[in-house]
Image (cartoon, helix red, strand yellow):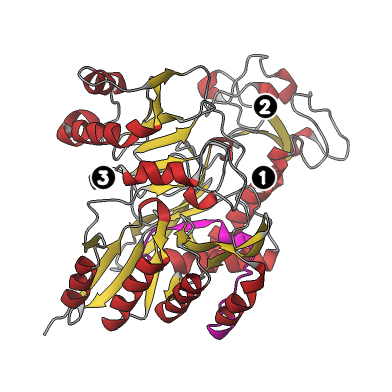
Amino acid sequence: MFRKNYTVKVNLPGGIVSAGDLYAIVQAAERARVADTQLGTRQQLFFTVADKYGPGFLLELEKAGISFETNEERFPNIVSSYVTEDVFESADWVSEGLYKDILDAFDFRPGLKINLVEGGQTFIPFFSGNLNFISSGTGNYWYLYLRFPRTNILYLWKELIYSRDIPRLSHLIEEAVLGDRDLFCDRPSIDGDLLYERITAGEHFATQPISGELKLPPFKLPYYEGFNSHGNKLWLGIYRREELFPLSFLRELCLICLQTRIGQLYTTPWKSLIVKGIESADRSLWDYVLGKYRINVRHASNELNWQVEDLCEEGLRLKRYLVRQFDNEDTRTYGLSFAIKTRPKTGLFGSVIIRKRETRRMNQKKAWDRYDLLHTRDFNPNSKDYVLYREDLEKENLGTYLISLCKDFYALRSKENLFGETLGETVPHDEAAPPEKWVLQCSCCLTLYDEDYGDPPNKVAAGTKFENLPADYECPTCGATLQEFLRAEKSRFHH
């Protein structure tokens, strides 16, 4: 007889769960013979339950007032940067109390992805939602960047939104967008002004004019594992390489929280768990439970800055494979984040994207997995403007090119090449290094200009020397000026 598993998703709005609620969820799951739970990129929990125990588990969740979905994704979790408060530095006016007030005011289950993010932090993605509320420099007011469903089209709302209006505005936008999918979903171009006019025509909101551009800090993923100090207390970050959190471990974690009067725990988009407000005198309790379950809380940084699709063993295997290569080459990845996409339009956050493609070879039934390697323009992980770095790669070659891309990132960030030439300088002839052994590389998108080939589509003939390029020459990919090109060894790009 065919048996199925229940995949049960429990949303934790804002990535927040009380120790009591998590304890109740864990106990119900253990009674359903579940051993582990997985965290998701939208700060939710996943449980895989055998069909024999599924109905009982769901009934217990219902009785406990826990919101859940089974084998579907109709209601994505609300993501927030609440977790960063009292952990990483953040703006003055965005407080834990304000987050809770906004989240508590949601009297509906959103069908669109909503992000509620403080604009000074770099831990929570800014634009991975459909409705992306980002704190402004004006107290209690937020930018709204709307990313239309199944597109990368971003639309900036014309005013700043008052905190208390966020739930109501979100509901109205969702009704309008999902009620007219032909206009506002999965299209190459969408009229955001039309949506704005529809929403504001019959509604009043407390708004402020936008006085300046949103300025986000450069991306730097803070180290989020282990014991760390904040003020006179500690916080603890827990990451699991296999994404599996043993329920027996979580049960004891909750009991320690209740014993030491820690009211809440927090999940992150990096599929990790954070406990705040630990008293130094209580650290021995936490050390004990970590040791009892052999929980490692000091992984290498180059393993922590990855995003993999939820419940995706294929992506996890590839991540483990690539991280091993990073370790073997002692590769630095600070300032970068990586995403592995095995399915289309999964909305992962990353400055470097490993995207699976599938081809079939003649006379063979097996599908051979191959990958494209992309990065966002300027390596900004909050961008959806991708630049193709290498395409149609076998798994065995991915690591080589990925490590090369990391090295290119640092070369470009230093604004000079390995030999110290600065941006925009004429490339001199060097007897030890003839000109034909060099290329120019765009510092914005890594496009190459090779003298041997020129740029015929832009009326630059093959053989045109670097010094003879027109002064107004622009990168054919991103439009960067000639001054944004760097000199690099041609041999670095011949593999």
If you read the primary sequence from the N terminus, does the residue marked by circle 3 or circle 2 appear first?
3
Question: In the image, 332: left or right of 322?
Answer: right
The picture places residue 441, in percent across and down from the top left corner, at: 66, 34
Residue depicted at x 63% and y 62%: 234
Residue denoted by label 3: 110
Amino acid type for the residue under numbered disc 2? Glu
As measured in the structure, the alpha-carbon distance from the residue carrying label 3 to the one carrying label 1 is: 41 Å
Q: Residues within 10 Å of mark 2 (few under 14, many from 20)?
A: many
- Which sits in the foreground, 323 or 455? 323
Residue denoted by label 2: 484
Amino acid type for the residue under numbered disc 1? Asp
User: Mark 2: which secondary structure?
Assistant: helix
The picture places residue 265, in percent across and down from the top left corner, at: 46, 62
Question: In the image, 224: left or right of 109?
Answer: right
Residue found at the far right of this picture: 431
The picture places residue 453, in percent across and down from the top left corner, at: 60, 31
Q: Is any atom of residue 41 visible in this view?
A: no
Q: What span is in magenta? A: 291-312
In the image, residue 135 lies in the stretch drawn in magenta? no
Of tags 3 and 2, the one toward the viewer is: 3
Residue denoted by label 1: 408
User: Mark 1: which secondary structure?
Assistant: helix
- Which sits in the foreground, 473 or 213? 213
Of tags 3 and 1, the one toward the viewer is: 3
As measured in the structure, the alpha-carbon distance from the residue carrying label 3 to the one carrying label 2 is: 43 Å
Question: In the image, 206: left or right of 195?
Answer: right
Amino acid type for the residue under numbered disc 3? Pro
The picture places residue 198, in percent across and down from the top left corner, at: 21, 21
Q: Quadrant of residue 142?
A: top left
Note whether 343 is above or below 417 in the view shown.
Answer: below
